Amino acid sequence: MLLQIQHITKCFDDRTAALTDVSFSVDQGEFVSVIGPSGAGKTTLLRLLNGAIGCDQGAILYQDEHFEAARGRRKRVMQKKTATIYQDFCLVENVSCLQNVLNACLPDMAALPASLGRFSRTQREEAVRLLTRVGLEDKLDTPVKNLSGGQKQRVAIARALLRRPLVLLADEPVASLDPATGRQILGLLRDIQQTEHLTVLMNSHNLALSREFSDRLIGLREGRMVFDGSVQEATPNVIAAIYGTAIPE
């Protein structure tokens, strides 16, 4: 099993529970969407999975290795198993698309070449290949600030892929995009997931898009997991249990 989440609990500083006793597993090559109302714990879950925060109880395992218990160099090695794309892109606006993708290499480089931006030929060739893969072969030297929102998210996807992750974590990746562009971005993610046999774990407020592009849905409500099953198993009654009486379109 690629990823196992075992009875994880996370509380805020005021001891309010963000997640309580959440358990599920994800196999290689799945596209899984975590759905639920605002405040359900979706973003907290992804932050636990990429190591931005630690859980209070429970365990996270990548390929049977305990992620949350790793320290130092071993922790950094395990963090490379994931890459995250965000709603707000998290790009450097004033530099080129190519530079933004290459920035994914910086954590693994020595201080001097990193500070001077001395990337290897192999790194540059791979960054160009990935920008071509996401449809931006004509934007290599274009500053990110001159791109549309959809193009920025494509740069962010290429940057994430340069890390060669086992799991791509997508935190509301199309929430800031118009519906047509959002569907294009999720179509790209789905295509990459299928052709590269990559695992995608996405949280989303958009139920319709989650249904369209996912193999499986995980429903969170008030920090607890209330559903784990296929898109076909997510009946209207299940959706009502996740979201309450108001069922989103």
Image: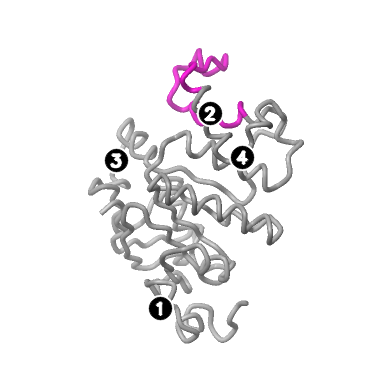
Q: Amino acid at mark 4?
A: Gly
**Taking 176 as reference, is 41 above or below it?**
below
Spatial CA distance of label 1 from label 2 is 39 Å
- Is residue 114 rendered to the left or right of residue 22? right
Mark in front: 4 vs 1:
4
Secondary structure beneath disc 3? loop
User: Residue 121: percent from the left, percent from the top?
Assistant: 49, 16
The mark that comes first in sequence, 4 or 3, is 3
Spatial CA distance of label 4 from label 1 is 34 Å
The residue to which callout 3 is attached is 70
Secondary structure beneath disc 2? helix
- Is residue 20 rendered to the left or right of residue 92? left
> In the rendered structure, are the residues bearing label 4 and label 3 in contact, judged by CB atoms less than 8 Å apart?
no
User: Residue 185: percent from the left, percent from the top?
Assistant: 60, 52
Spatial CA distance of label 3 from label 2 is 29 Å
The residue to which callout 1 is attached is 233
Q: Amino acid at mark 3?
A: Ala
